[in-house]
Image: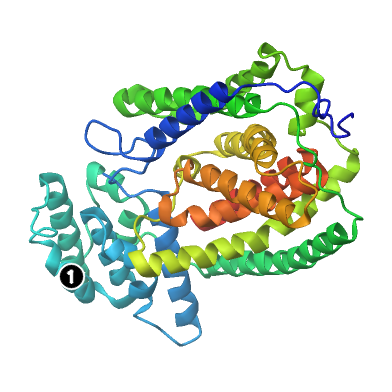
């Protein structure tokens, strides 16, 4: 019997082998552990944010948000000094330079006396560990300027090294930067956007489920493809290429000062080279047409898939909302940890117009295409095949979809550098992309939904970074 979804003849030739499956899963497990857990010689994760020697984009966005709300409340005649503690707790309990940044925010909101008081505990170090000479010098420079502000004296400019470490916070300390309610407008606009489109997504998701139950909307990953272990082998090879090249780029960025931006600069090339993994099914004897059909690498029904991409973005937002609830539960139980970040966010803060356009190209074209091909195309399809892709039982099909979506989305989220506590947020979005993959067959809608997600996120970062 022919497979209507292009996965090869059902009941006929099957590709792959049990040994290939075992080797592939071992490779995936090893690569996953090496990429997500501490593996550096100093016990650190090369993919995770390091303790900052200077304040970066995430801290700047936190600070601008605090001062933006403060400016708005003061304009309404309702000052709220506790806003710093409420909105910047991660800075207050962070590294020495982050605690100095917290004090600068206190200075901007409540005055220099309160800021100097907030620094009292820092003078003796953190948890019994004394401050480094660099941090001691920065603390002294900050206190000197707070004292000048308290005495209504001119505030001397910071020296070059301290100014570079503090960045925007140094401008606040010197009185050259202040809060703007425009940041609040950006945040409220984002809230309205996500809430409004999310409500649309709930309706679209409900309709899709109803149409699936009535048979009007077909599941596109049933019956199972014939590729078997070849799909998981392909995914393992892709991980090897992609994360191997990423690790080399990280090493060069970390150890060679003149190559500090190499990770971002070579990223498009890494995405393109990693596509070579798609040649593996052909090596294993699978016709390219069967591979493309099985993983959804086709245009589907043309422009209709573009519309489904927009609908897919709305469908992903309710799942992101569930992820946000999970993040809230985790941070309540285990503390906030590091604020979620990404190398592109830091790069965005230092980029001009051309650099910003480059990052949009990377995040909105390169990443959606490659990540959808391998996570929702190759990996999700493999998981559906092995968890019940041929089952005529409706309950087992639903169970197969849930398991496949959760496993593939968890891997997708955890290999991103936002931190474990914030992984559910990204995993929620990925579950939404899996549903579009399931209902459309083609990867085009997922790529478009993924691109919209990244574009909106970058635009929000641009607004918050000013």
Quadrant of the image occupied by residue 290: top right
According to the picture, the residue beneath numbered tag 1 turns out to be: 116
* Horizontal side of residue 456 vs 48, given as left or right: right
* Horizontal side of residue 53 vs 343, given as left or right: left
Quadrant of the image occupied by residue 10: top right
- In the displayed structure, 128 sits above or below 414; it is below
Q: Is mark 1 on a helix, strand or loop?
A: helix
Q: In which quarter of the image is the N terminus?
A: top right
For the residue pair 106 and 152, the one nearer the viewer reads as: 106
Residue 147, how many percent across, how many down?
16, 68
Residue 237, how many percent across, how many down?
55, 22
Q: Residue at 72% of width from left, 40% of height from top? A: 447
Q: Residue at 20% of width from left, 71% of height from top? A: 118
Residue 80, how many percent across, how many down?
39, 82
Find the residue positioned furthest to the front: 11
Look at the image and tell me whether residue 270 can be seen: no
Q: Residue at 29% of width from left, 60% of height from top? A: 101
Q: Residue at 80% of width from left, 29% of height from top? A: 7
- In the displayed structure, 288 sits above or below 97; it is above
Residue 308, how many percent across, how many down?
82, 49
């Amino acid at each position: 019997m022919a497979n209507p979804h292009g996965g090869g003849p059902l009941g006929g030739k099957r590709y792959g082998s049990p040994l290939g499956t075992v080797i592939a899963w071992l490779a995936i497990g090893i690569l996953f552990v090496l990429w997500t857990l501490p593996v550096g010689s100093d016990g650190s994760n090369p993919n995770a944010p390091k303790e900052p020697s200077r304040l970066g984009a995430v801290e700047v966005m936190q600070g601008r948000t605090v001062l933006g709300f403060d400016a708005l409340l003061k304009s309404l005649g309702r000052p709220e000094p506790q806003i710093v503690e409420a909105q910047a707790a991660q800075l207050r309990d962070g590294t020495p330079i982050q605690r100095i940044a917290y004090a600068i925010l206190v200075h901007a909101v409540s005055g220099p006396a309160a800021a100097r008081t907030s620094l009292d505990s820092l003078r003796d170090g953190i948890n019994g560990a004394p401050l480094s000479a660099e941090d001691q010098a920065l603390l002294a420079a900050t206190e000197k300027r707070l004292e000048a502000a308290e005495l209504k004296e001119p505030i001397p400019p910071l020296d070059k090294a301290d100014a570079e470490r503090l960045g925007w916070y140094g401008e606040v300390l010197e009185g050259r930067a202040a809060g703007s309610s425009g940041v609040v407008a950006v945040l409220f606009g984002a809230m309205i956007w996500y809430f409004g489109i999310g409500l649309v997504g709930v309706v679209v998701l409900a309709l899709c489920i109803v149409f699936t139950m009535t048979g009007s909307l077909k599941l596109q990953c049933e019956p199972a493809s014939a590729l078997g272990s070849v799909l998981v082998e392909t995914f393992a090879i892709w991980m090897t290429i992609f994360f191997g090249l990423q690790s080399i780029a990280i090493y060069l960025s970390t150890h060679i000062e003149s190559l500090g931006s190499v990770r971002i600069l070579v990223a498009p090339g890494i995405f393109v080279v990693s596509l070579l993994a798609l040649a593996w099914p052909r090596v294993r004897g699978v016709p390219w047409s069967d591979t493309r059909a099985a993983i959804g690498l086709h245009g589907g029904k043309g422009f209709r898939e573009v519309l489904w991409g927009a609908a897919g973005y709305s469908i992903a937002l309710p799942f992101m909302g569930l992820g946000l609830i999970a993040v809230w539960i985790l941070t309540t139980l285990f503390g906030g940890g590091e604020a979620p970040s990404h190398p592109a966010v830091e790069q965005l803060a230092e980029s001009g117009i051309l650099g910003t356009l480059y990052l949009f190209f990377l995040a909105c074209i390169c990443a959606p295409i490659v990540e959808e091909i391998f996570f929702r195309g190759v990996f999700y399809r493999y998981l559906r095949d092995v968890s019940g892709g041929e089952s005529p039982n409706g309950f087992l099909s639903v169970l197969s979809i849930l398991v496949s979506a959760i496993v593939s989305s968890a891997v997708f989220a955890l290999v991103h550098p936002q931190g474990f506590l914030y992984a559910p947020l990204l995993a929620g979005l990925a579950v939404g992309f899996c549903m579009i993959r399931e209902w459309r067959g083609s990867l085009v809608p997922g790529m478009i939904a993924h691109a919209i997600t990244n574009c909106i996120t970058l635009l929000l970062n641009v607004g918050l970074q000013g």
